[in-house]
Amino acid sequence: MNEISDIRHPVDETLAIPLYHQVYLILKEGIRSGTYSAGSALPIESTLCTEFGVSRITVKRAMRELVADGLVVRQRGKGTFVADDAPGPARNALDDLLQSVQAIGAATDVQHLASEIQIPAADVGSMLELKGDTKVLRSNQLRLSDGEPLAVIIAYVPENIASQLDPKTENLPMLVRLNMAGVPVARAEQEVTATLADPAVAAPLGLEVGAPLLKLTRLVFDDSDQPVEWLTSFYRGDRYAMRTSLTHENVGRHSS
């Protein structure tokens, strides 16, 4: 049986949130974070009362909220168990990004505009925190959708990282290549802005200079917090859109 450990009255009586709801939120987070896995038993009510420093009525009410949300099931004579279909640990945003990049790669064709080892421009070297005359791999791709130009993607990777990449994966997005090479990608900083096409980007995209574009920049770090990729993508505004699904999760129901 799972047990809550090192809880020292985590509920706060001075808050406007009722005590039962505070207990509910803490237990719910334990379920969603994986502290309590699907099918595992929650501590008995008397244990929860002691750990949270609340009454049995408060614990019972918190449990009713968890049952109503489908997060736990109560079995007479056995206890309270996390539902088999309860949401597990929240997805890692970086995993979602990798899936998105993989999907774009699978849905598009690629033309290589350039790929070479070079001494980077000052701004690229600064973003990648390079020292001295450290070189980078510059990969410049044109992504096509249904045979039509979609995006110009320019990625820079430090030479020592580039040496780990499999040449056979050169048609894949750089983030996917890094993952396949075992580079321990830990986090990324990404920004999307509007911009206008300059001559270098307008030509491969089949646009006039000054046409509107979506510009995406991404700085990727490894598990030692060192930059391993600096990417800039220019997407045609008439053929590409970014959509995000946003949901509101109720923090709970207040009933009298």
Image (cartoon, rainbow, N blue to C red):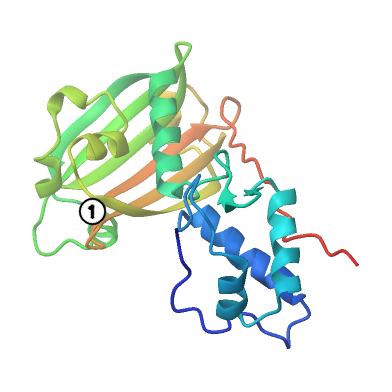
Quadrant location of the N terminus in the rendered image: bottom left
Residue 202 falls in image quadrant? top left
Residue at horizontal 32%, vertical 29%? 141
Q: Residue drawn at (68%, 45%), measured in percent from left and top?
A: 70
Amino acid at the residue labelled 1: Ala
The residue furthest front is: 77
| Residue 22 picture location, percent across and down | 68, 72
**Looking at the image, which residue sits at the far right?**
256
Above or below, 119 relative to 199: below
> Is residue 203 visible in this depiction of the protein?
no
Label 1 CA crowd tier, 10 Å (few <14, some 14–19, many 20+): few
Placement of 100 over or under 220, stated as above or below? above
Quadrant containing the C terminus in the rendered view: bottom right
Compared to residue 239, the image places residue 209 above or below, namely below
Q: Is residue 174 visible?
A: yes
Which of the two residues, 256 or 247, is positioned nearer the viewer here? 256
Going by the image, does 135 lie left or right of 110? Answer: left
Residue under label 1, please give it: 121
Tell me which residue sits at (78%, 80%) in the image.
Answer: 16
Q: Nearer the viewer, residue 235 or 55?
A: 55
- Where's residue 200, x and y in %? 37, 34
Vertically, is 247 above or below 204? below
Q: Secondary structure at mark 1?
A: loop
Q: Quadrant of residue 96?
A: top left
Q: Position of residue 170 (x, y in %)?
A: 21, 26
In the image, taking residue 99 as reference, residue 166 lies left or right, namely: left
Q: Residue shown at 13%/44% (left/top)?
A: 118
